[in-house]
Image (cartoon, rainbow, N blue to C red):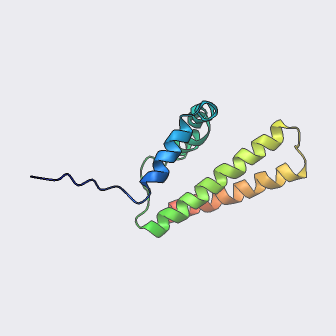
Amino acid sequence: MYAKLVCRHVWEDYIEQAEDIRHTTGSKELYLLRSQTIERVFADAKELHGMRYAKHRGLDRMKMELNLLFACMNLKKLANRLWKNGLNTLLSCLIELIFEVFEEIYYKIEIAS
């Protein structure tokens, strides 16, 4: 006779708990917003910022490029939120300046490689 051996991952219990929580009433609505919030960032990076293909070789160069790209995207998002909330003061101008500096660094790295 053969016995069936079931192997479970170390984190399997926690994964099942997370899935159970995700399917509760309050969490379903939050999970539906994921496509509008979290996945939108990666879609924008892919479509608008050329992240469909890797431009560099090596993990360190790619990490550097992604860190700069996402820092630029976060600063841009912050500047837009400040502008929409009517806080177009010196702070938003400073954030836009920082964004432009990051963008220049990003394109210099892109040209150099």
Q: Residue at x 81, y 36 (%)?
A: 84
Q: Residue at x 71, y 45 (%)?
A: 77
Does 60 appear above or below 77?
Answer: below
Instruction: State how many labels appear.
Output: 0
Q: Residue at x 67, y 59 (%)?
A: 102
* Residue 70: quarter of image: bottom right
Q: What x and y, as percent, mark residue 59?
A: 44, 67
Q: What x and y, as percent, mark residue 106?
A: 59, 59
Q: Residue at x 71, y 54 (%)?
A: 99
Q: What x and y, as percent, mark residue 80?
A: 76, 41
Q: Which residue of the protein is positioned furthest toward the front in this rendering?
A: 1
Between residue 56 and residue 24, name the one nearer to us.
24
Between residue 100 and residue 54, name the one nearer to us.
54
Between residue 32 and residue 104, name the one nearer to us.
32
* Residue 30: quarter of image: top right
Between residue 79 and residue 12, name the one nearer to us.
12
Q: Which residue of the protein is positioned furthest toward the left in this rendering?
A: 1
Residue 73 lies left or right of residue 44; in this view the side is: right
Q: Is residue 47 visible?
A: no
Q: Is residue 76 visible?
A: yes
Q: What x and y, as percent, mark residue 66?
A: 54, 58
